[in-house]
């Protein structure tokens, strides 16, 4: 995938062919970057799982193979100047390729689902990291599951578009809801006039990186902030991040399925986002407040910050005075 990023970047600059007003190499580049990030996360995670190591190695290998199949077909179709997703043309190469492509998608989803289930029965690091990984993989699986709507819910029937050479191509299915794909935002190409299921798909797929990053930031801050040193406090704050991010995933999925563009939210979407902000900020504030009070409160056992040792301060023969001196 790293090599693909280099090749696709070169193609983006040197190859002028386009599909729907976007370079044919834009999609391979985005998939390459996404798989570099997600694959690196799995490569870091799987060796940390102590149970069923051989099974985990097999799952990692299966994910790599499925990814090569999936993104490989996307890259080949881009090089041919035609579409990988939803392409219903009847030429033999495309028909066989679509079957191979589908198997890769199923493989990626299946492997991620099995890893998510196995994470439920294993602890990785402290509580915060364990829950970050469990929730991250689980939300990534939900993000992948949205792909099932692309041909069903989002589809408005077959439509004909042009490939990079001006030849007609029949597409069945789309990412958009209420508006056809194409002419979207820069880089992402997400629709600006209708709903787009790629938005929650992206948010869910990369949730694990967000959650692990939150754990790493909290752990780094704990070296300088006393009330963050408790494992329970960091776990609760990580839970708040998971709660807020999951709510954002749900809101964007709901928004897309209603045929509404990410950049044109209506009053209902704004209300949902406001509720998300409140239900995230409130438990975060309560957790921080409780942790700071706990740090400031005297423990009475001589171990609170700034307390003098009590051992030997009282006793017979005036030894307490000697200890103080």
Image: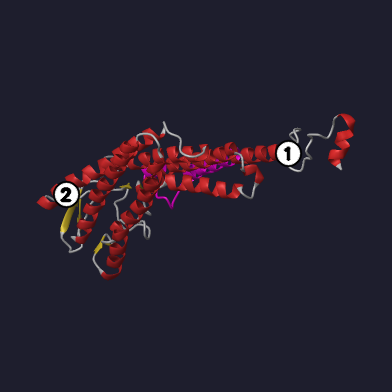
Residue drawn at 35 percent across, 46 percent down: 197
The dominant secondary structure in magenta is: helix
Name which quarter of the figure residue 236 lies in.
Answer: top right
Callout 2: SS: helix
- Based on the picture, tell me whether residue 264 belongs to the magenta stretch: yes
Name which quarter of the figure residue 103 lies in.
Answer: top left
The dot on residue 97 is 2
Indicate the position of residue 136 as horizontal and vertical percent values.
Answer: 43, 41
Residue drawn at 70 percent across, 38 percent down: 293
Relative to 183, is 269 above or below?
Answer: above
Name which quarter of the figure residue 13 lies in.
Answer: bottom left
Residue highlighted by disc 1: 304
* Outermost residue, left side: 92
For label 2, count other residues whose C-alpha is less than 10 Å away and answer few (under 14), some (14-19) or many (20+).
Answer: some
Indicate the position of residue 169 as horizontal and vertical percent values.
Answer: 17, 55
Give the magenta-colored segment's residue range.
254-283
User: Dividing the image into 4 quarters, which one contains the N terminus?
Assistant: bottom left
Discs 1, 2 touching: Cβ within 8 Å: no
Residue 103 visible, this angle: yes
Cα–Cα span, label 1 and label 2: 67 Å
Is 192 on the left or on the right of 296, as rendered? left
Indicate the position of residue 286 as horizontal and vertical percent values.
Answer: 63, 38
Relative to 5, is 292 above or below?
Answer: above
């Amino acid at each position: 995938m790293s090599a693909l990023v280099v090749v696709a970047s070169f193609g983006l600059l040197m190859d002028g062919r386009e599909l729907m007003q976007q370079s044919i190499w834009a999609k391979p580049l985005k998939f390459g970057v996404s798989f570099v990030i997600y694959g690196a996360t799995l490569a870091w995670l799987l060796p940390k799982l102590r149970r069923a190591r051989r099974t985990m190695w097999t799952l990692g290998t299966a994910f790599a193979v499925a990814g090569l199949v999936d993104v490989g077909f996307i890259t080949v179709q881009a090089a041919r100047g035609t579409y990988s997703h939803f392409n219903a043309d009847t030429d033999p190469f495309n028909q066989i390729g679509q079957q191979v492509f589908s198997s890769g998608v199923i493989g990626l989803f299946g492997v991620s689902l099995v890893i998510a289930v196995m994470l439920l029965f294993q602890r990785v690091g402290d509580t915060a990291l364990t829950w970050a990984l469990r929730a991250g993989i689980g939300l990534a699986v939900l993000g992948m599951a949205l792909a099932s709507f692309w041909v069903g819910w989002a589809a408005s029937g077959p439509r004909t578009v042009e490939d990079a050479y001006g030849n007609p191509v029949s597409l069945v299915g789309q990412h958009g809801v209420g508006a056809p794909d194409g002419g979207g935002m820069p880089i992402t190409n997400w629709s600006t006039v209708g709903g787009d299921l790629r938005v929650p798909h992206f948010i869910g797929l990369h949730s694990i990186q967000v959650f692990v990053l939150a754990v790493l930031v909290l752990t780094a801050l704990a070296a300088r902030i006393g009330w963050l040193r408790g494992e329970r406090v960091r776990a609760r704050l990580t839970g708040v991040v998971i709660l807020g991010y999951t709510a954002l995933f749900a809101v964007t999925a709901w928004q897309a399925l209603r045929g509404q563009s990410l950049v044109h939210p209506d009053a209902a979407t704004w209300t949902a986002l406001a509720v998300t902000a409140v239900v995230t900020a409130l438990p975060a504030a309560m957790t921080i407040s409780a942790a700071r009070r706990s740090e400031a409160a005297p423990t009475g056992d001589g171990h609170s910050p700034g307390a003098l040792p009590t051992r030997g301060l009282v006793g017979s023969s005036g030894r307490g005075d000697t200890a103080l001196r």
